[in-house]
Each structure stands twice: as structure tokens, then as C-alpha cells.
Image: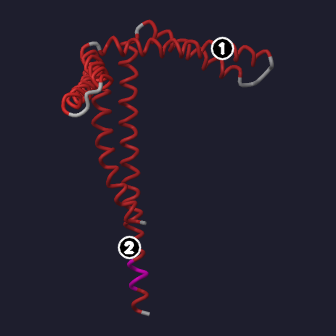
Amino acid sequence: MKDFFVKLKNLSLITITAGLVIGILLLFQPDKTVQLVSIMCGITVISLGVGAWISYFTKVKSTILAILGSLAIILGIVLCVKYKSIISVVLLLFGIFVLISGIVDLVSAIDAKRNDLKSWLLSLIMAAASIIMGLLVIINPFSSMLILTRILGASLIVYAVMDLISFIQVKKIIKYSLADQIDIDAQEHHD
């Protein structure tokens, strides 16, 4: 069982390193990182489309395969070239959703106040925060995306640091546990 935890924690070194690197990139270079991720996604989708066309010419002469391959290539090109527009539309929809959710929460907070519930003030504050966030995302989606990207980067860095601390603790626990096991085995051999 201890070997399993050692192997598992050793694998977590990969996630710690990746989390730190990606977090730093997202925190300090959000625009370039989003562009790089969008281009990588676009290239992947283009590759799928090309793969579909290769299958069409070499194996299966399926019209659906050709159509899906063409759509994938077009979508991949759009992802590579117009990633800001796509992200802006997605964020605009997200902003509208958050705004509507905030308005619903505001109505609920007002109802809670009318019914003398103690949590109405917290609900009101959360509703106001949601409404403000929704409006900010709707008004300026790309700047909002950069801020959210930086928050994600900072979160990944915090996660990586916490996971590193956990990794060190597990190593110490296993070290002490193995030392205790050796002592017990040595005592059994002497008896």
C-alpha cells in the first residue's frame, strides 16, 4: 500500500510542475497563453479534419466523413484565426447568464428580507456581486477573460504549492513509517 502512495505522489510531481508552469504563464502572459491554447486547439481540430479526409480517400468513401472532415478543418482555421471573437461570444453568453442569475438572486434576497430571514443581507451582497460581474463581462468580455485567466493562473500556482507541501508530507510519513517497520522487523528477528 505504501508503494502505491509513493508512486502516486511521484506522479503528482508532474502535475505540480505543470500546474506551476501553466499557472505562471496564465498569470503573467494571459493573452499569449490564451492565443497559444486556441491555436493548439485549432491545429488539433484541423488535424482531425485532415485525418477524416485521409480516411475518406484511403478507406471509407463516406459522404458524412468528408463533410465532418471539412467542417473540422473550417472550425480549426476559425479557432486559430478568430479565437478572440469566439472567446468574446462565449464570455458574453457567460456574462448574460451571470447577470440573469444575479437578478434572480436579488429577487430572492428581497423575498428573504420580507420574510425576515437572517441570510437576506448575504444573499443581497452575493446578488449584487453577480450582477456587477455579469455586467463587466458583458461590457468588456476580452478584458474580463484576461482577468479570469490571471485568476486561474494564480489558482493553479496555489494548487501546485499546496500539492508540493502534501507531497513532502507524504514522503516524510512514508519515511517514518518505513523506519518503524524496520525497527519492528529487527525486534522480531532478535526475539
Is 7 placed above or below 84 here?
below
Q: Is residue 163 magenta?
A: no
Say whether residue 152 is visible: yes
Q: Secondary structure at mark 2?
A: helix
Local crowd size for mark 1, using a 10 Å CA cut-off: few (<14), some (14–19), many (≥20) = many
Is 37 placed above or below 21 here?
above
The quadrant of the image that shows the C terminus is bottom left
Say which residue appears at 37% left-offset and 43% top-offset: 161
Whole-percent x, y for residue 131 in the image: 56, 12
Q: Residue furthest right?
A: 115
Frontmost residue, 45 versus 24: 45
Identify the magenta region.
Answer: 182-186
User: Of the residues shown, which amino acid type is indicated by label 1?
Assistant: Leu
The quadrant of the image that shows the N terminus is bottom left
Residue 177 is tagged as none
Whole-percent x, y for residue 189 in the image: 39, 90
| Structural distance between the alpha carbons of marks 1 and 2 | 59 Å
Q: Is residue 53 left or right of residue 10?
A: left
Frontmost residue, 77 versus 131: 77
Residue 106 is tagged as 1
Q: Residue furthest bottom?
A: 191
Location of residue 142 by image quarter: top left
Q: Secondary structure at mark 1?
A: helix
* Mark positioned earlier in the residue sequence (1 or 2): 1
Frontmost residue, 177 versus 107: 107
Is 76 placed above or below 5 here?
above
Whole-percent x, y for residue 21 in the image: 27, 36
Q: Which residue is mark 2?
A: 179
Local crowd size for mark 2, using a 10 Å CA cut-off: few (<14), some (14–19), many (≥20) = few
